[in-house]
Image: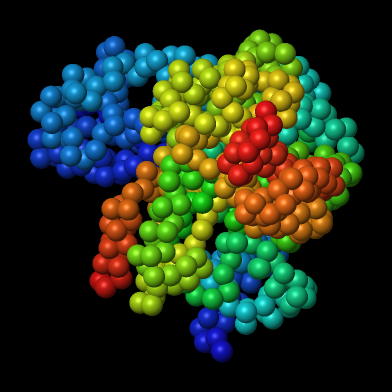
Amino acid sequence: MTTYKIYIPRDSSALSLGADKVFKAIKVEAANRKIELEIIRNGSRGLFWLETMVEVETDQGRVAYGPINPSDIPSMFDREFFLGKEHSLSLGITSEIEWLKNQERLTYARVGITDPVSLNDYEAHDGFKGLRKALKLTNQEIVDEVTDSGLRGRGGAAFPTGIKWQTVLNAPSEKKYIVCNADEGDSGTFSDRMIMENDPFVLIEGMIIAGLAVGADQGYIYLRSEYPHAQAILNEAIDIAEKNGFLGKNILNSKFSFKLEVTRAAGAYICGEETSLLESLEGKRGLVRYKPPLPAIEGLYGKPTVVNNVISLATIPIILDKGSKFYADFGMGRSKGTLPIQLAGNLKQTGLIEKAFGITLRELLYDFGGGSATGKNIKAVQVGGPLGAFLPEHQFDTPLDYEKFSEINAVVGHGGIVAFDDSIDMSKLARYSFEFCAIESCGKCTPCRIGSTRGMEVIDKIKDGIDQEKNVEVLKDLGETMVHGSLCAMGGMTPFPVISALNFFPKDFGLEKSET
Amino acid sequence: MLTDNKLLKIEEHLTVLKDKPGALLPIMHAIQDDLGYIPEESYEPISKALSLSVAEIHGFVTFYHHFRTKPSGKHILQICRAESCQSMGSENIESYCKEKLGIDYHQTTEDNSITLEPVYCLGNCACSPAVMIDDEVIGRVTEDKIDELIQEAKKNDNL
């Protein structure tokens, strides 16, 4: 009897659209029809408007169907989808789908293709090649590769990863740590989650290489509590890696030992700020620390610590495997390599796009995103999470590049893009930015703690038509104070969305005169 | 007053976890996962085990949104309030849930079935609006879907 190979995603966004129900329905239908299936729970390819997307292995490659609901299953069996045959929900050969074809997947090379917790799959798709190469290099050679690749912190701050590693390498200490910042709290972002759920070994490999490079033997993944699926998969993957000699003592028979564990966070957005994260890991309130000292010099428990975002660490293996030049050849200017872009919010086609820096917002919103989901005009987009500026239509031609965004007082951040249609009231979003800051502020510095609440009040006054001209001045002045006087990016960047909303959409605030 | 059984459980978690670096965070998770909340009566034994003041324990628990000091309902329904969900109409979902359940955020329905909480991003922004019920994330939520979730949750309560 022939066995047909079927792929059904286990990514939590796919699950949120019913992937488990599709899985069960396919199993039941196959059993009823006495058709033998080998079902693999792969990761998601990141085409979320097509989830649940089911794939079938054929001689021509993998063939996709979607979006599938349990009610579609009988007709799919009638049409013999398990042979790759046509159905009204056919999407053709998966790798030929425009959305995927037009990407450059380096960090996400395996995402959606492999079974996330299959070590065999991982190794069959170039997994652990980077680590094997790194084991033959000196510490300095590894750090040089990372520096030369031009990789910058993908968490949002865009600090050169190699320089951070060099600082930790140079810091004399018996004990050093690698900390992965997996507290992905920015709205519109899910790329960390997708790596952790869909290719956890690549993060583990990146962290081992980081430990090897700087001389750290302990790693922590500080994971947000809102990600229970990611936690389960990471723990499973760490367990498998340990049992197979990739973690623990004498990794791959070398002299290098590295332990890794997941620490579950507790729902504080501020703990995505690296010093607050370290405080939390130490079992304290997540209060932001003064810098200096930098965590690279005095980090976790006062020891030199590499704190990197999930994507930065997950990009290390391919840099070590293919070389710094290979990676640096992607991108533009000082923004080298690729960025996992997350299209979210009010768009027809949402999902994950890994692309070299340089693509414009317009291309992303319309060519990939297909315009708004509601069919209305896109009024504004917010790039880089809740601390990123709102960009109006006339800025949509800005290329995704750290410096180009910086020139227009915007940030690329973690690459999340949230689109809003013209039904949105920008003054409400601006007020929400302050409200969010008030809820999530750690409370250590005054501009953030007090400014956020005062900001809400000032917006209310403007909207109520009270002394508008004066209050607009107050709002701008408050923004300046927060930008320059806050201890970290929480208070220091909250004014970006607020002031951009005010500048570009004054009408939404009840201000007649246009200031743009 | 806490039952002896609960105090015993707290002691057990302390014995297992107190020597871990950064022990307070995993200890609090263990207690909440086990008891459903962190009783204030636990502060004293924790402070002794970790050589911290009761004030420090209180400060820690109240800093983190995830931790609760009162029991929740049988289910926790979290509604995402973040920007991506706002762009897809989460405000309507919020008000629908509040009206349907007859409660506001941080409150529990009279039958002790559902506690309503806001959440700021579930990482499901490609499928907004999103909610989470217990450990299950639901995407592209509609009012009908909310009805279904609530019904499902309550049905399981009565089993």
The percent position of residue A229, horizontal first and vertical second, equals 46, 47
Q: Inspect this view and state whether residue A192 appears.
A: no
The percent position of residue A311, horizontal first and vertical second, equals 61, 32
Name the residue: 49% across, 51% down: B80
Name the residue: 76% across, 58% down: A450
> Left or right of A94: which side holds A245?
right
Which quadrant: the C terminus of chain A? top right
Residue B71, placed above or below residue A242: below
Residue A21, placed above or below residue A449: above
Q: Inspect this view and state whether residue A285 appears.
A: yes
Name the residue: 65% across, 26% down: A316
Name the residue: 30% across, 68% down: B154
> Left or right of A314: which side holds A73?
left
> Left or right of A511: which side holds A110?
left
| Picture quadrant of residue A160 | top right
Q: Nearer the viewer, residue A417 or A179?
A: A417
Q: Nearer the viewer, residue A86 or A383?
A: A383
> Left or right of B76: which side holds A437?
right
Which quadrant: the N terminus of chain A? top left
Residue sticking out furthest to the bottom: B1
Residue A16, placed above or below residue A3: below
The percent position of residue A48, horizontal first and vertical second, equals 39, 32
Looking at the rendered structure, the number of numbered marks drawn on it comes to 0
Colour scheme: rainbow
The percent position of residue A386, horizontal first and vertical second, equals 62, 42
